[in-house]
Image (cartoon, coloured by chain):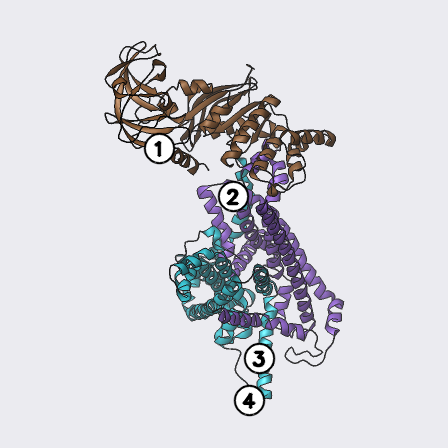
Amino acid sequence: MRNFTRIITILVFIFLYIPMIILGIASFSTGKDIAVFESFTFHQYRELFRDDGLVSLLTNSLIIAVISTLSATVLGTVASLGIHKSRGRLRKAIMTMTNIPMTNPEIVTGVSLALLFAFVGIILRINAVLGFWTLLIAHITFNLPYVILNVMPKLAQMDPDLTEAALDLGCTPVQAFFKVVLHEIMPGIISGALMAFTMSLDDFVISYFVTGSGFVTLPVEIYSYTKKPIHPKVYALFTLIFLVMLILMVTMNLLQARDNTRRRKLMLRRAGR
Amino acid sequence: MKSRFLSGPYVLWMVLFTLIPLGVVFYYAFTDSVTGAFTLANLGSMVNYWPIFLRSIWLSIFATVICLIIGYPVAYFIAHCKPTTQRLLQMLVMLPMCMSFLLRTLAWVALLEDTGIINNVVMSLGLESLPLIRNNGAVILGMVYNYLPYMILPLYTVLMKIDNRLVEAAQDLGCNSRQIFSKVTLPLSIPGIVSGITMVFVPAVSTFYISQKLGSPDTILIGDVIEMQFKSAYNPNLGAALSLVLMVLIFICVGIMNRFSDEDEEGMVTV
Amino acid sequence: MSNELIRLTNLVMEFDSDRILDSINLYIKDKEFLTLLGPSGCGKTTTLRVIGGFLTPTSGDVLFDGKRINDVPAYQRKINTVFQRYALFPHLDVYDNIAFGLRIAKLPEKEIDERVTEMLEIVSLKGFENRKITSLSGGQQQRVAIARALVNRPKVLLLDEPLGALDLRLRKDMQNELKRIQQAMGITFVYVTHDQEEALTMSDTIVVMDKGKIQQIGKPEDIYNEPKNAFVADFIGESNILDGTMLEDYSVKFFGRVFKCVDKGFAKNEPVDVVIRPEDIDIVKPEEGHLCGTVTSVTFKGVHYDTIVDFKGFKWLIQTTDFCPEGSYIGIRLNPEDIHIMHKSEYSGMFGDYSSYSAEYDEIADAEVSEDEE
């Protein structure tokens, strides 16, 4: 049984990582065809950093991801506090609404927003509605549920007396939030923001429908490559992003592991006393 | 008491950019693209697209089932590793989700193409090149590849949480390992299965990139048709009607799936 | 000592048309140790939260030093609270937890340091300044919670079942400790508990509550010796409660016999509840007894035996150091001061019959209480 699942797991991981390997190898190839490795070179990487176009696309993606993540995190955290306090039908209605972007297919979310923007454009007689602002609105919209679904459980776990204790000791409700509640729900806020950030950075489907020619993000541009041959320096970019992501995740993992070990030691010490 | 109103801005935002857009989809679906008058023609023409709807559903059901079959053992394996290994493997499952799925799909094209990596190997052995791409199989493969992590993660989350004492209790009561699985582990992991199926099926049935790159004009999916209405055919009203039907179909499918699980909606989406 | 500090007048609290507090009238004196005692759901915690400012009463007034404070938020009241599960801030260490309120009040850091150090000494936690909250034992966390509240020098300290999470031994120690701190600091304590023994040990005044109403207010001795109704008689200690008729002053009839008693002021032939504490009953030979009955069960309780005696179908609990074997026929004597008379109330007939006695009555009662404590 154990061996069976082990073999499947190994095969699945090979399956998952084949494309990464291929793209990684292709990024070091002199040839233009991804399928043929000619000879080894760093040329694509040099090209990549010389290419202002790609760098500015990446910057666009980062701008949208950062701004939308920050806005969604603030708006979503504040909203979570409100939802946490509300009960019954109101709470249920809000949570159902929160789940709409999560369960609706991305294409429907994209299409519906595109139609909304088109509709508003017609009413306000603006020709080119789609661009930075529509993209930002769309990203904030699909980022919000990630924040809320990560913060809500932390609020539920928190001892409700903590807020009252802070009020009791002289905090105004706002002080109580910043001095106590925020610390308690921080892990949820961080994981929600991280999730939102990666979703936003990598989003193609929704962005594709709500952005115009004025402001293009990297994934949308890559899609347009399907019509023209893809330049190998994109593989170099992919490989770099992959490495950054890998380092980021390993670091987070190590931090978490250290934290866990410390906690376990603490528990042992307490049990031993 | 007042803190309830903190969710006000959020509610307003979601109404503006989630509920109203869906209303606009309705509006477009029921109006004529030229005159703007009320019409049922868009919805009426859905009949023509029925085969495409059916194909989308069949292919994604196939992909979902495959994901479940190969994802379950993986999730099971990860859930029974040491905690440190668990975290590492979980991270390795999540990592591909953060990478451009467009480029990863392109890599599969490079692998499967008639002059691609696999066929280069095959031909260098002196064999005929294999028809690996531009068919239903390739589309399913693309779906499985892209959405498999969405199956593994919720399954892993559920399997990890199963209290080992339950397994020991089952052993104590005389279950062999197969019975433990079928009587304890499997029933307890149903919420994860439902969540995983939903998270694979919904994006798979509505995808429009995978079929374009790995499929052929014969394997066109409903997502492709919707995309065309907005980006090349410029018939947003028909596109809206198609989206509406797609949404309703998914709503029904997810609704049926959720009947199998007791999980409340707040816990449904576990990424 | 007799300055009135807090007054609650006609306090009513309703949640979704459920009446949690029903016209509570109560005043609390300065430097007093007052305990709100009652079973869970009786409204004691709600009363405390109204005083603390975490709940606004549906109607009625909360007066502090003669001023109405209904609309003063919690953070502006000179009242601090020790919470049931301590509610210590997990992201701060012991020192920072205690200093929290002083820092909010923006006191100079030097004064904060002095007061925190002094407080640590009072709660015997010197040397624990930089310990993480999570590394403390329950009793230590309890002390930090008390220190954190007291360091602000409140006029009133509210304590919501502060010892509920501690084990029995520690609870006894902390009871003495709390009483000592209260007397040393000379401030008013309002203490909530469902543990009658705790209430009797620590309080200057006990307020017995049930179903959102105050059943009796008084000194511990008065509450124990002169319960106002069957509920109080049963909740505070053990009681045999019987139907009787007050023939005239100092004379009551029950079980077909006329007994002398020390109560007066009842109407002629008024039906009353008669309370007899199990430890007040003297066991004698059958021929010398006022009443005779058969022992149906005996349980050893350490200091005494719980003896259940059947008197004509009504079972009494008698706590005695004399062992009477099961089945033996015994007599009892009642002195006039052992008989306590109460007016009939809505609780009449609900308590004080030991027909369904089980040796675990204490534990069962406790389990019921802690079950819906949340």
State which chain is coloured cyan. Answer: B
State which chain is coloured brown. Answer: C
**Which secondary structure lies at badge 2?**
helix
Q: CA distance from mark 3 to mark 1?
A: 88 Å
* Residue topped by disc 2: A83
Q: Is circle 4 on the same chain as circle 3?
A: yes
The residue positioned 68% from the left and 59% from the top of the image is: A60
Circle 1 or circle 2, nearest the eye: 1
Of the chain colours in the picture, the one used for chain A is: purple
Q: In this image, C345 relative to A199: left or right?
A: left
The subunit carrying tag 3 is B
The subunit carrying tag 1 is C
* Residue topped by disc 1: C299
Q: Position of residue A154 (x, y in %)?
A: 55, 47
Say which amino acid is labelled 3: Glu
**Which secondary structure lies at badge 4?**
loop
The subunit carrying tag 2 is A
* Residue topped by disc 3: B113
